[in-house]
Image (tube, grey):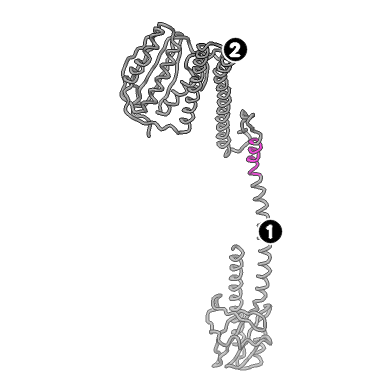
Amino acid sequence: MISQLLLSSIEHHFIEQDADEINVMVNSIKKALHQSPTDTLKNQEALSQAISGHHGVYYQVERNGVLHYSSSDINFRPPTTDFPVVKNITANTLQTWRNKDRGYRGIVTLVTIDKNQYRIISAIDRDFHQGFLKKFTQSVALILFGAGVLTLIAAGLGVYQGLKPLRGLRDQMDFIQTDKLDSRLDMHSVPVELKPLVQSFNHMLTRIEEGFIRLSHFSADIAHELRTPLTNIVTQTQVGLSKERRTEDYQELLYSNLEDMERLSKMVSDMLWLAKSENGLINPSFETINLQEEVQSLFDFFEALAEDTHITLAISGNTSNISGDRELIRRALTNLLSNAIRHTPEGKTIKVVLVDTANDMVGISITNEGSTILSEHLERIFDRFYRVDPSRQRHGDGTGLGLAIVRTIVEAHKGVIHAQSNSHSTTFTIHLPVDGPSH
C-alpha cells in the first residue's frame, strides 16, 4: 500500500517533469522555425541545433503535411496521426505510445509561419523512467521486506520481554502445591499493571488455604465425633457377647447401643442438611412469623426439661412480625435454647429478649448464666464440631453441629448472629430483616 502510493507519486512527478521539458522543446523548435523560414536548408540547420544537452528527447516537424525535419530515424507519424493538437502543454495533455518496443511520451502542436503550417511532434523516451521505477520498486520491496522482518523480530523480542513478569508468575504458581498453600506471589516483582491481578490471586489463595484448613479440621473433628459412639457400640457389644447373660442385660445393651446409634443418625442428618444448604438445595418457604408466639411455644416444649434442672425460662419485649421460613426459624431457636439449657447451672434463668432495631431489623437475644467463653473461642464457636474445651467429651444429645446450623439458617434469611460472654453469662444475639431476604 505504501509502496504503491510512493510509486504513483514518483511517476506523477516524472510526467510533470516531462511536460516541462517538452514545453521547453516546443518553444525552442518554434524559435528555430522563425529563423530563415523561407530558406529550407538554413531552417533545417536551425532545427538541428534547437535542442542540445537533452538525453532521450525526439522531435519531428512536418510542413504542410510533408516531413520537414526529424531529429532521429524514428518515424513518429503513424502512431501520432490521431493525437489531438495541444495548445497548453500540461501533465494531463501528454500522450503515451510505443514504437519498436520502446515507450514514448509526447504531444502534437501546430504553428503557422508565413502561411506555412508546421506540425510539431515532440517526444521523450519514457523507458528510462520506467527502468528507474522498476529498480526503485525492487529496492522499496526489499527495504519493506527487511523492515518487516526487523519489525517482526523487534515485536517478538518486545513481546518476549513484556511477558517475562508473567513467566515469573507462572513459575511461582507452579511452586504452589496443596502442602504449600501458605505461599504467596511476590507483588514487588511485577509491573504496576499486574499488581491487581497478583493481589486478587493472593486473596484467592488465602480463601483456598482457609478452606483447606477448615476441611482438614472438619475431617479430624468428624472422625473424633464418630469414634466415641462407635467405640461405645463395639465395646458394649463385645462385652455383651463375651459370655451368656440375662435377657434384661441384653435389652439394656441394645438400649445403650440404640442411644449411640440415634446420636450417630442425628449427626449424619445434620451434616446432610448443612451440605444441602451450602449447595442451595434447601428452598425456604416464607410466611409471616410472630416471634413472641414462636418463643412461647418453644418454652412450652422445653418446660419439662427445664423443670428437671430447676431452670427458669423468661421472655420479655416484643417485635414486629417477620417474613421467614417458620420451620427453619423454629429449628434455629430450638438449637439455641437446648444449648442454653445444657450449659445453664441448676436453679438459674434463661432470658429471651425480643426488640425492634434500626434499618427494619428485629433482634432476638438468648442469655444463659454459666461459665465464661473466652474471646478466642467466640469467633469459632459456630464452626462445625468446635469445642471450647477439646479435652471434654460431648454430652447429652449434642452433635456439635447445632450452632453451625443456626448460623446457616440465619444467613439464609440475610441475618447475622454473634455471641458474647462475660464473667457470669453468655448471650447469643440474632438480627433478622423484617421483610426477609429477596426471594
The number of discs equals 2
Residue type at tag 2: Lys
- The residue that appears at 66% across and 92% down in the rendered structure is 41
Q: Which residue is mark 1?
A: 146
- Give me the C-alpha separation between circle 1 and circle 2: 99 Å
| Quadrant in the picture for the C terminus | top left
Nearer to us in this view, 367 or 165: 367
Horizontal side, residue 277 vs residue 105: left or right: left
Does dot 1 land on a helix, a strand or a loop? Answer: helix
Q: Is residue 379 visible?
A: no
Nearer to us in this view, 331 or 149: 331
- Measuring from the top left, give residue 193's x and y in whole percent: 57, 39
173 w.r.t. 66: above or below: above
Residue type at tag 1: Gly
- The residue that appears at 64% across and 79% down in the rendered structure is 103
Does dot 2 land on a helix, a strand or a loop? Answer: loop
- Measuring from the top left, give residue 154's x and y in whole percent: 66, 51
| Quadrant in the picture for the N terminus | bottom right
Using the rendered view, name the quadrant where residue 212 is placed.
top right
User: Which residues are the magenta region?
Assistant: 161-173
Q: Which residue is mark 2?
A: 243
Using the rendered view, name the quadrant where residue 364 is placed.
top left
Secondary structure of the magenta portion, mostly?
helix
